[in-house]
Amino acid sequence: MNKYLAGCCLVMLLAASCASKGNRQEKEDASPQKVVAAHNNARIVPAYTQGFELDYKDGYVLMDIKDPQNEESTHFQYALVPRGTHPVGIPGSYTVIETPVRSVICMTSLQLSNFIKLGVEDKVVGITSTRHLFNPTVNRQLKEGKTAKIGIEGNFDNEVIMSINPDLILISPFKRGGYETMKDVGIPLIPHLGYKETTPLGQAEWIKFVGLLLGMEQEANEKFAAIENRYNELKELTAEGKLKKRPVVLSGEIHGGNWYAVGGKSFLAQIFKDAGADYFLKDDNRSGGVTLDFETVYNQGDEADYWRIVNSYPGTYSYDALKEQDPRYADFRAFKEKGVIYCNMREKPFYESMPTEPEVLLADLLHIFHPNLLPDHTPVYYDLLK
């Protein structure tokens, strides 16, 4: 072999060796541990939520979940570890969850809203009620058998749950429950307490919680940043000193002799405040549900400028329909002056989309309370009743 051919052979051998090494390196870099590590460069930093805290460790994340309305309630502790890894040093009180999570059962529309916002409805393999379900993707998955109905709270079908065999189940432990029997199935249960948050941005920030579970930290951070920026932009329109008048808003209806509302430290009171209005129970220090008699509500809310109602009414809701429910409603100023703010859950995906769209909800209210601030806004959830 002449020197020229020998040199060519040597170059080819070196090139092949380098290519082989490169392929091996690519395979090593594509290992689960390194892929997850690279993806998780984006971290979740809660800013508004009071319901979960995170502590990033070497190779895992400690998650502490608690009731945002009750610091003394049960805390739920989880250690999120990259799938296929076994990091050391995890405290014994933490339940280990492998991430990214590949399949989930959602118990509520609020939980589902996070998956819809992230565009990952395919991760939802089970839901409870399909009443007022609007999302076309989830409805299609139900028809195709890719998502199953598992029953309702207190009456879950464990056989269906076991046949689905999701990576985890998101629950609402402070609601009606029925979760004790689900523990026997052996699938991890993780509380999603977005519904207990007392601020609109705190509730919306649970999209980061779901993003962390799914390995979609960057996407969740970006989605929430857009929500936060727009919300605060709108909120600034009603900052102190910018309004001549702050209307008063009544909320709720009477059912079975009781008027159901929420306290003055609630999500609803906060979004009214941010929209430049005062909730009729703004001085009430409770953050959860409040049960009142009609006389109490009338004494405190009969002169309210607006009255917010969300219900599920068959047909066209009207002032006549409202009066038929209870003739005393016609005595409220908001009724007399056509100030009823209404959302029909049969027609609009209120609980399915609203939790991740507080900026849209705020815009609706701003448009009603102060029309001059957002004159071109098209209502999405709330309209003045006609």
Image (tube, rainbow, N blue to C red):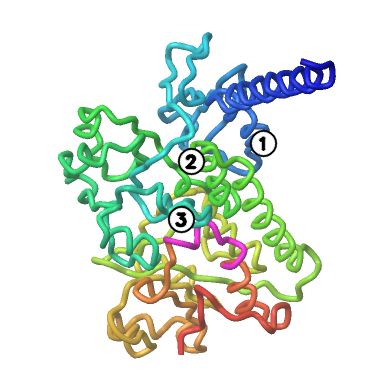
Q: Position of residue 120 (x, y in %)?
A: 47, 51
Q: Helix, strand, or loop for circle 2?
A: loop
In this rendering, is residue 176 above or below 139?
Answer: above
- Is 48 one of the magenta-colored residues? no
Q: Helix, strand, or loop for circle 1?
A: loop
Q: Which mark is residue 42?
A: 1
Determine which quarter of the picture holds residue 244: bottom right
State the separation of the CA atoms marked 1 and 3.
22 Å
Q: How many marks?
A: 3
Q: Which residue is mark 3?
A: 113
Q: Is 227 placed left or right of 62 in the picture? A: right
Which marked residue is nearer to the observer: mark 2 or mark 3? 3
Q: Which residue is mark 2?
A: 69
In this rendering, is residue 57 above or below 258?
Answer: above
State the separation of the CA atoms marked 2 and 3.
21 Å
- Amino acid type, label 3: Ser
> Counting other residues with Cα less than 10 Å from the Cα at mark 3, is it few (<14), some (14-19), or many (20 or more)?
many
- Amino acid type, label 1: Ala
Q: Helix, strand, or loop for circle 3?
A: helix
- Most distant residue in the top direction: 89
